[in-house]
Amino acid sequence: MTESSDQRLLARHDLAWAIATGGICVVLFVALLWFAWHYAATLFLILAGVLLGVALNAMTELLGRAIRLPQPVRLLIVCLTLAVMLSGVLVLGGATIAQQATVLSNTIKSQLTNVKSFLEKNGVDTSYFELGQAEGATDSAGTTTPGAQPTHNLPSASTLASSGGAIVSQSLKVLLGTVSVVGNFFIVLFLGLAFAAQPAVYRAGLIFIAPAKYRAQTVAIVDRIGETLERWLLAQLLTMLAVFAVTWIGLALIGIPSSFILGIQAGLLAFIPTVGAVLGGLIVVMASLASGWVAALSAFILFLGVHALESYVLTPIIQRQALDIPPATLFAFQILLGVVFGIWGLALALPLMAIGKVVIDYFKGDDAVTA
């Protein structure tokens, strides 16, 4: 009778412990989701720094196959080479880039206005476009819109104060935006250099966090994720360079202005699969409309050729051992993260999917059983 009571008491303790453990896990999971949701931009910033560190480490290891030097020396050579290349582009083509970027911006705005006018002539409502006249402007009929001040009257003190406040507010927004962009750039750069300088230290620290009985599995998963990201990043860099060169040379031969900056944006957008190619092609075609329909059609054919080169030649050859994710699955995940987290989610959707795929493949394979 006593043994039966002890067994029931032990069962109650086990049930209470299981309920408490389950509740704690649920609370921790909800807290983790809340943290990831509210600090997604910071987490994506850290992930970008990790990817930069992985890319630098991959280049360092690749250099080590040709030159027998210590890892810090090889990393220094890689960083100096990249810095010299970037400085050369800015020194030799900085003025061209700035000039072509201004021309491209004005061309895109002009073409958007033309598209709006064309849609309005064909009875399409374009009120959702923010391309109208500014408040206080004078329309084509010579009438002054509401809020406009007569040109023959001096502005009042309140108008001057409000205008000054608006100028200061806009200037502050631009300043804070610039500081934010520059700050994010240096954060990613610092994290990338720190991770690339001592990859073994951060790998050991990540493995140390895992429980002792799962440490062997953690080692295998971390190593596979690192290898997968390294192969993908090297392949992606080669693809981006090829897209940049082909787009730049092709548009220059067609005679499209701002061909160099259009090639740069096409190469950068190639980092984002599927969506990046569509955005790059749309920008190229819209910028080419200013040169006539023949130039626009030629640019569209060039875009189709570059897209075919990227999708059916470069990706199968260069990235055949890097990732194997169905395009529809990747596109849906990109759209989801892009809508929820903006540009960060759109740009880093593929690395996140790669990490998830490595983990799933590991636990589905035989290695998880034998580990």
Image (cartoon, grey):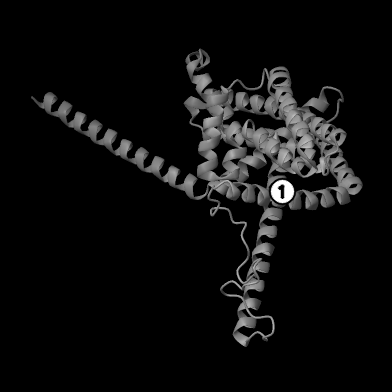
Does 120 sit above or below residue 143?
above
The quarter in which the N terminus is drawn is top left
Q: Which of the 4 image quadrants contains residue 327?
A: top right
Say whether residue 11 is visible. Answer: yes
**Image spot of residue 38 (x, y percent):** 48, 50
Q: Residue at x 20, y 30 (%)?
A: 10
Left or right: residue 25 versus residue 189 is: left
Determine crowd level at label 1: few under 14, some 14-19, many 20+ residues with C-alpha closer than 10 A: some
Q: Residue at x 57, y 33 (%)?
A: 352
Residue pushed farthest left? 1
Say whether residue 198 is visible. Answer: no
Residue that mark 1 sits on: 108
Camera-side residue of 26 and 252: 252
Camera-side residue of 201 and 54: 54
**Image spot of residue 155 (x, y percent):** 65, 84
Camera-side residue of 103 and 161: 103
Does 184 sit above or below residue 371?
below
Identity of the amino acid at label 1?
Ile
